Amino acid sequence: MNNELLAIGQRAARDAGAIILKALNHPRSPDFKGRTNLVTSTDLHAEEVIISNIKSEYPNHAILAEESGADENNSEYEWVIDPLDGTTNFVHGYPSFAVSIACLKKGIPHIAVVLELPSNRLFTATKGEGAFVDEIPIHVSGNTSLNWSLLVTGFGYEHGRNWEANMALFKKFTEVTQGVRRLGAAAVDLCHVACGMVDGFWEFDLHPWDTAAGILIASEAGGMVSQMDGNEYDIHKNHILVTNGEIHKEMLAITKPVVELSNR
Ligand code: IPD
Ligand code: CA
Ligand code: CA
């Protein structure tokens, strides 16, 4: 069953990826879900194709997709889909976006596929069976100190308290690491932790479809996943910290007080 689920997830991601890459060669005009929250016809088309791939094999599975919402039923399986993570990058032609598809079993990520674009690198994971890029096993970095680390974060579309708090964290981490990147596609950021390109990632206000696949890939690659105050993370929580494990405690010492202040 696991192999079949993974194969369907991969096929759906590849089909969506082909649509997205083709659209990159044409003018891309966004609609606005908020002033900076963009959506394009490509997001919608990619999502349709992913859902029809899944429905053709598993008509009874539940689905939660960013653009079309929840299609619930009693199945223990639920597919959580971001058809195009990093839409702003896609619209501007900045090369960091992805298709993110997870299959949850009883609410827990079980199968994960992230197709990084435009590089077309396929990250996959199955619970308990490791993480891979293009079928090659991947592992988080072995960096043991924040001083030697490269981090990545993101900023949500709402410019409220959490956004301000993240500005403060961005400054703090920039002071004590080798640098902080801000690429604009959370699923890609998580995969970059998984393959050791960066040592840690944190962000506020993400949605289930942003993290469902990436957290399984990162944890199967040996990473550690929690909320920014150290509590257990699930895809409905509103802040996340993912590291190589080695620097988790050091990062928590910085994120925890900031989160507690922001929540007051
Ligand atoms: C966004 C990206 C971005 C993150 C935003 C997300 P979208 O997803 O993951 O990195 O900072 O919070 O909403 O809207 O491009 O699918
Ligand atoms: Ca997203
Ligand atoms: Ca999206």
Image (cartoon, grey):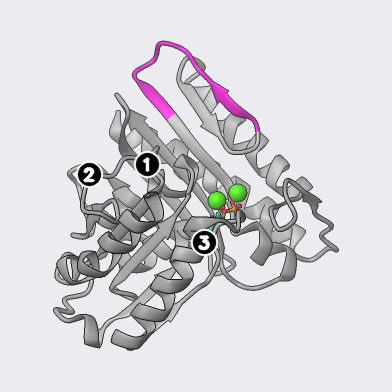
Looking at the image, can residue 24 be seen? Answer: yes
Residue 112 screen position, x and y as percent: 37, 45
Q: What's the residue at 17%, 81% (across, down)?
A: 145
Left or right: 97, with 45 as reference point = left
> Label 2 crowding class (10 Å Cα cut-off): few <14, some 14-19, many 20+?
few
- Tell me whether circle 1 and circle 3 mark residues in contact (CB < 8 Å): no
Above or below for 167 versus 229: below
Instruction: Please tell me how crowded label 1 is: few (under 14), some (14-19), or many (20+) other residues with Cα within 10 Å.
Output: some
SS assignment at label 1? loop
At which x and y percent is residue 26? 83, 63
Q: Residue 99 got which mark?
A: none
Report the front residue among 2 and 234.
Answer: 234
Q: Image quadrant of residue 136?
A: bottom left
**Quarter in which the N terminus is drawn:** top left
Q: Mark number for residue 237?
A: 1
CA distance separating discs 1 and 2: 9 Å
User: Is 102 situated above or below 177?
Assistant: above
Which residue is denoted by mark 2 in the rendering? 232
Mark 1 or mark 3, which has the lower sequence index?
Answer: 3
Magenta-tinted stretch: 68-78
Q: Residues within 10 Å of mark 3 (few under 14, many from 20)?
A: some
The image shows residue 100 at horizontal and vertical percentages of 49, 48
Instruction: Tell me where residue 147 appears, x and y as whole percent.
Output: 23, 87
Amino acid at the residue labelled 2 = Glu
For marks 2 and 3 on the same chain, the one whose residue lies earlier in the sequence: 3
Query: Mark 2 and mark 3: span between their CA atoms?
Result: 22 Å
Q: Nearer the viewer, mark 1 or mark 3?
A: 3
State whether label 2 is within 8 Å of ligand 1. no
Location of residue 75 by image quarter: top left
Which residue lies under the disc numbered 3? 163
